Each structure stands twice: as C-alpha cells, then as structure tokens.
C-alpha cells in the first residue's frame, strides 16, 4: 500500500494476482480492517498494473469466487473494484460487462443497504462510458429506475439512491432517461413528504443543481416537470426545500455546484419577485462560509476535492444486533479525486470570481431591484 501506484507494471500485476488469491480465502466474518486494507491494496495494484494482461482475469476470478461463495460483506468491495477496473478502460470483454450490468440490477442485491453504494459506484462507470454502453443502458433504464426507487424507500440507502440520480444527471444524455425523470422526481418528493430527512434534502439539492447546470435547458425542464405534477410546485419546492437546503451545505465542492445551479434557476423567465429575492439571499449565503461564528468568503478557501457523497466506515457488530452488510468506502478504488466536479475548470479563487461574474451578467438589471444584493456581490467578488 505504501508503494501504491509507483509499483512497476509487471510487479503490480504479480502483486494483484497474489492479493486476489488471498481475498478469495478471506473468512466472511474475519477481521474487517484487514479486509479493508487488502482490497485497498488490490485497488492500488490495479491502478499501477493498468490494462496489462492478466489483471482483468485475476479480478474477475476473485469476484466470481466471492460471488458464488456468497461472501456478502465482501461484495461491496468487489463492486468498487469492478468499477475501478472498468474506469481504467478494461472493456475488451464487452459481453461480459453487459451480463454483469444485468446481474447488478437484480432486486435482491438492492435489499441490503450496505451493498447499494458499491452498486451505485459500479453503475456510475457504465454511465460515464455511455458511448460504449448506450444501447444496453437504454434497454435496462426501466430496471435502473426501479432499483433507484427501491433504494430510495430505505432510509439507510436513500442517500446512495440520490447518488445514482446524480450519476445519471452527470453523465447521461437527458433523452436516455427523460421518460423516467418525472417519476423519479415524484418519488423523491413523496419520500421527503413522508419523513423529513435533512441529509436527503441536501443530497437532492446537489443532484438537481448538477442537473440544471449540466443540461442547458435543465432549469426549464425541471420547472415544467414539477408544475405538471401540481401547479406552482416548482416555486413551492424552491422556497421550502431548495433554498433552505443550500444553507445547510458545507462542503466547498458541493457549494460550488449549488452556486452555479442556483444562478441557472435565477435566470428562468417569469420567476416571481419573492422567489427571486429569496434566491438572491440564498446565493449570498452560498458565496459565504461561516467559521467559528464569523463570516468568511468562500473564495478565500482553497477548493478541495472531497467527494460529494461520503460513506463512513462500517461500525462493529454488537452481539444481539441484526446483521447488516456494512459499506466501507474504498478511496483507493476512485480513479479521479472528484468525479462529481461539473466545473473542473474552476479550481482557484480568481477563476471562480470571474466565472460567477460572467454567470450573473445577464441578471444585473433584476439584481439591482433587490436591496443590497449588488453591493454584497461586489464585496464578495472584488
């Protein structure tokens, strides 16, 4: 693990084969820390070995053995390793991955909340490689959104379900999932109405911010979809969920996405004056960061690369508790530091200020009608 990706290619491949054989012998209820470190080393060896001959064979053999042996608590690691391997470009066996996609959409796999984030990580790569798997994704799209709703219905996997939605918004063309978009929104709103979950509201705000930023007409599409469900629902959702949700978002990478997503919403024509004013104040909150009770401009902070959806390492099992498969996020299985960054060109203070000014330029006239907003923006962006 210390050598990581600095291993020579040939040595990395041999190391990977050996580690995969060790993983096949792991006891399902063995030392969880040892298993976590082992799969982390497998991920690093896979990165160092790249697409060298034998790496794909070794990984697939390991996954098959653990799958057949029903090593439930190790399968979430397998999903992440498979996702990394596909990320690295190991797509020679397209039929094999096509079969894999069908298998990971089996309803029974999504019943255990601990498996869902790993499954989402694997599906995310299929989305990112939509150019290769487009026809297959089109066929399974109904099943995908069924699994989304299944995961959303469980409190423990609801955040991962929104992560799946984020991945679809981030990587897939809208026409591929447009027939399921309104139903997905309805499921999210119903979930929020049935029980108020602050974290879920924040995740949904981030997801929709990605949607309106990635798709040129995303804000208009979102307004139409919500208002078709109920007249005035879009404005109500903004005031009751979206804008309050932005005040709770702390991670700078999330805030960056939400800033530009909200500006896209503010650019919608015929937005009620009260909604626009509330959006202005929400934007100012996003552009500031409170630390120890003191307001600090967000652009005085260094943009970091923390992932949007963090999953803590699973806790130990207490005797008498019902066993649940734990999801342990494998940082080494991520190819990029932040795959959710829809604005990779903005990574420093100067560039960020310029981008915000440019995005707000079409709104100068209406911004001037809201008391104090223009002055506050000048102070932040100067």
Image: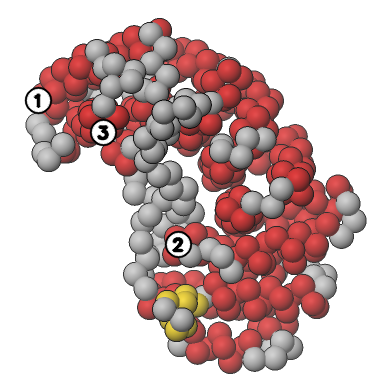
Q: Tell me the element at label 1.
A: helix
Q: Which residue is mark 3?
A: 33
Q: Is the C-beta separation of discs 1 and 2 under 8 Å?
A: no
Answer with left or right where residue 110 lies relative to residue 187.
Answer: left
Frontmost residue, 156 versus 120: 156
Secondary structure of residue under mark 2: loop
Color scheme of the displayed model: secondary structure
Q: Is residue 214 shown above or below 148?
A: below
- Crowd around label 2: few <14 · some 14–19 · many ≥20 (10 Å): some
Q: Which residue is mark 1?
A: 11
Q: Residues within 10 Å of mark 1 (few under 14, many from 20)?
A: few
Name which of mark 1 and mark 3 comes first in the sequence: 1
Occupied quadrant, residue 370: bottom right
Q: CA distance from mark 2 to mark 3?
A: 27 Å
Q: Quadrant of the N terminus?
A: top left
Q: Is residue 310 left or right of residue 168?
A: left
**Between marks 1 and 2, how big is the CA–CA gap?**
38 Å
Whole-percent x, y for residue 229 in the image: 86, 47
Tell me the residue that label 2 is attached to: 251
Is residue 115 positioned above or below 98 on the image? below
Relative side of 238 to 252, left or right: right
Tell me, yes or no, if residue 12 can be seen here. yes
Residue at 63 percent of width and 73 percent of height: 282
The residue that appears at 33% across and 20% down in the rendered structure is 29
């Amino acid at each position: 693990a210390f050598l990581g990706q600095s291993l020579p290619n040939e040595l990395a491949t041999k190391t990977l084969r050996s580690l995969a054989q060790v993983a096949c012998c792991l006891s399902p209820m063995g030392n969880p820390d040892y298993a976590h470190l082992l799969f982390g080393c497998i991920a690093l060896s896979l990165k160092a070995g790249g697409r060298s001959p034998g790496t794909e064979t070794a990984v697939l053999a390991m996954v098959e053995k653990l799958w057949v042996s029903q090593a439930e608590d190790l399968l979430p690691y397998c999903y992440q390793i498979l996702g990394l391997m596909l990320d690295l470009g190991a797509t020679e066996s397209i039929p094999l991955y096509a079969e894999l996609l069908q298998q990971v959409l089996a309803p029974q796999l999504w019943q255990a909340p601990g498996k869902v984030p790993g499954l989402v990580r694997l599906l995310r790569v299929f989305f990112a490689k939509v150019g290769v798997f487009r026809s297959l994704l089109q066929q399974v799209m109904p099943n995908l959104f069924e699994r989304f709703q299944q995961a959303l219905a469980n409190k423990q996997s609801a955040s991962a379900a929104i992560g799946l939605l984020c991945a679809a918004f981030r990587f897939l063309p809208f026409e591929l999932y447009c027939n399921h978009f309104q139903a997905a929104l309805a499921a999210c709103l119903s979930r929020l109405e049935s029980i108020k979950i602050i974290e879920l509201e924040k995740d949904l705000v981030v997801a929709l911010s990605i949607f309106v930023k990635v798709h040129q007409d995303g804000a208009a599409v979102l307004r139409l979809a919500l208002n078709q469900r109920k007249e005035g629902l879009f404005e109500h959702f903004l005031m009751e969920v979206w804008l309050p949700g932005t005040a709770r978002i702390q991670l700078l990478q999330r805030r960056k996405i939400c800033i530009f997503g909200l500006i896209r919403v503010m650019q919608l024509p015929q937005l009620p004056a009260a909604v626009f004013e509330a959006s202005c104040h929400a934007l100012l909150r996003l552009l500031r960061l409170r630390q120890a009770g003191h307001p600090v401009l967000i652009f005085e902070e260094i943009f970091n690369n923390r992932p949007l959806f963090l999953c803590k390492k699973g806790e130990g099992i207490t005797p008498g508790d019902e066993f649940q498969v734990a999801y342990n996020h494998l940082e080494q299985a991520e190819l990029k530091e932040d795959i959710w960054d829809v604005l990779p060109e903005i990574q420093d203070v100067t560039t960020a200020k310029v981008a915000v000014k440019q995005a707000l330029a079409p709104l100068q006239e209406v911004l001037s009608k809201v008391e104090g907003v223009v002055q506050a923006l000048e102070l932040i962006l100067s």
